[in-house]
Amino acid sequence: MATCHIAKDPIKKVAIFGGTHGNELSGVFLVKHWMENGTEIQRTGLEIKPFLTNPRAVEKCTRYIDCDLNRVFDPENLGKKRSEDLPYEVTRAQEINHLFGPKDSEDSYDIIFDLHNTTSNMGCTLILEDSRNDFLIQMFHYIKTSLAPLPCYIYLIEHPSLQYATTRSIAKHPVGIEVGPQSQGVLRADILNQMRKMIKHALDFIHHFNEGKEFPPCAIDVYKIMEKVDYPRNEKDQDWKPLSPGDPVFLTLDGKTIPLGGDCTVYPVFINEAAYYEKKEAFAKTAKLILSAKSIRPCLH
């Protein structure tokens, strides 16, 4: 029986974004370092651009100035007429779209890595936006394997109402990298080094692919967003741990325990993420599933 291959054009343009949220410092410090000395991220035949996405928020060490930059890359905001009344992040989104897009066009960057930290105990997390993207499933499989025995989780945000217009979504292959726990406005050496390794393995994968390496079929465990839950009182540091119907989730001030409803086991993520209180998100419920990817190889002309 013949193996089905997916032929892809070689990757040419890659961007690494840091500072989308100005108080998530691992990406800020790595990108600033690579802007000064990019030797470690250079790969033959690749144009790799490190870029500070929200410099005003970085300067003030705050998540954003007017609104969340990681939520405004939708057609409505990208198409708004420039004016002094526009929120700073909407204007910045239009500038980024001009530099690295336009979104949904052939001219857009092939891959954008967007570097984030979380106050939640999520370890190394890769964020996938499209369950049918064989190339990224293969890349994520390579990163997970290369990081082992350090765990690496894959968060699938593909959902009809919960998926949002991310900064990285202007690329053909958007990749979110989330590493925690790390408090806002501080830098931890271990968290920064984990993020650094994830980028290294990702760029190595692209280099091997461009050199003609064929990657056989693979499968990976992913956690797909199901629902966002408001007002948590559940125990901290239990990201990725199964939560079954009847398990305690909330604790009221009068001591009453409220259990999980529903009829299936879920896997909570972003538990007690400090930045999500304003978004009325205490944690997100995910379902664990397996994604498979066909064999891929470069289409060398």
Image (tube, rainbow, N blue to C red):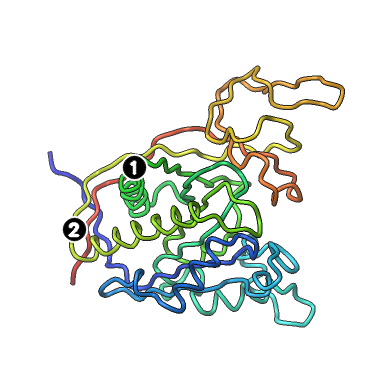
In the rendered view, tell whether residue 295 sits above or below residue 284: below
The residue type indicated by label 2 comes to Lys
Instruction: State the residue at coordinates (61%, 54%).
Output: 164
Q: Residue at x 33, y 62 (%)?
A: 203
Front residue of 287 and 114: 114
Residue 61 has which mark?
Answer: none
- How far separated are the C-alphas under marks 1 and 2? 21 Å
Which residue is rendered at x = 66% and y = 30% of the image? 235
**Among the 4 quarters of the image, the one containing residue 222:** top left
Disc 2: which residue: 213
Secondary structure category for the residue under label 2: loop
The answer to whether residue 33 is above or below residue 204 is: below
Around disc 2, counting alpha carbons within 10 Å, would you say few (fewer than 14), some (14 to 19), or many (20 or more)? some
Q: Which residue is mark 1?
A: 148
Residue 100 position in % (x across, y down): 49, 75
Q: How many marks?
A: 2
Q: Residue at coordinates 71% horizontally, 70% vertically from top-left?
A: 60
Q: Which residue lies most toward the bottom here?
A: 83
Q: Position of residue 176 (x, y in %)?
A: 49, 56
Q: Residue furthest front?
A: 189
SS at mark 1 in the image = loop
Q: In the image, 211: left or right of 254?
A: left
Q: What quarter of the picture does the N terminus occupy?
A: top left
Q: Residue flagged by tag 1: what amino acid is it? A: Ala
Q: Is residue 249 left or right of residue 180?
A: right
Where residue 55 sits in the image (x, y, percent)? Answer: 63, 74
